[in-house]
Image (cartoon, rainbow, N blue to C red):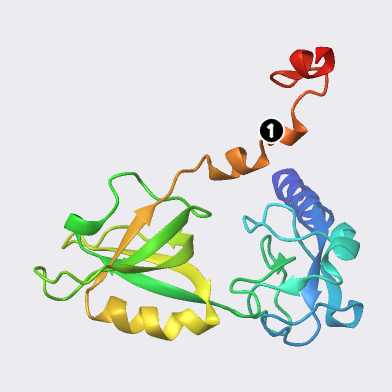
Amino acid sequence: MIAAIGVGALGAVLLWATLTDTRTVLVARDTIVRGSVITAEDLTETQVGADVALDLIGAGARADVVGQRAAWDVAAGAALTAGVVAEELVPPSGMSVLGIVLPPPVAPGLSLLPGDQVRAVVTAADGGSEQTPTFHEAEVVAVNPPAPDGQTVVDVLVSHEEAITLAAEAAAGKVTLVLDSRELDEQSAAPSGDEADPSASPSGSSETEEG
């Protein structure tokens, strides 16, 4: 009898701990469509167990969520998870994302990273052609793991106008990616000769003053 009472008391304690060890998270009141701006009316709250493995957004972050765009669809009643909001969606207006399949011989030797500036070079279908290759400027969005046959799909961001042309050229297997220097931004940010240290005397200035 005493043992039964002890077990019952222990069960009550565990139930109480389960009910009280919770946290409040944000939930979609109605379906939130990808790309739409999240409003306060789109959100409600619910409590979940503190040991839930999902990286859910707490109710305290409501102000950080409202006004941001949804990175993907959120079904009504679903809890919001980390990464669901984005200040800017990819692709942004006027741009397109295109997947380019690269066989091993034309994949850049250096591993590509999101944000890399590349040129999608269009080569002639006939290897002996003397036609000068053309290219499209692009930015790497994502690099997918190589397929069993060694091919790699690289998602690139290009202008909306160039996307159709580049897609056709890539489908014909005539596109390779060239990685440009990652130091370009640093070089462009370096001060030009006119912005150099004003304390430095220009060449020949002493002769000009004396003459």
Query: Residue 26's x, y, as percent?
Result: 81, 68
Rendered location of residue 74, percent (x, y): 67, 79
Q: Name the side, left or right, on which 99 lies relative to 43.
A: left
Judge whether residue 188 can be spotted in this image: yes
Relative height, residue 76 to residue 192 (above, below): below
Quarter in which the C terminus is drawn = top right
Question: Going by the image, does 201 lie left or right of 165?
Answer: right
Residue under the point 68% across and 64% down: 81
Q: Nearer the viewer, residue 114 or 164?
A: 164
Q: Nearer the viewer, residue 126 or 14?
A: 126
Residue type at numbered disc 1 = Gly
Q: Which image quadrant for residue 195? A: top right
Q: Which residue is mark 1?
A: 193
Work out whether 108 lies above or below 41. Answer: above
**Is 19 in front, or is 107?**
107
Q: Residue at x 23, y 63 (%)?
A: 151
Foreground: 54 or 99? 99
The answer to which image quadrant residue 75 occupies is bottom right
- Give x and y (percent) for residue 130: 16, 69
Residue at screen point 35% across, 55% down:
178
Whether residue 201 is visible, yes or no, is no
Q: Is residue 44 left or right of residue 95?
A: right
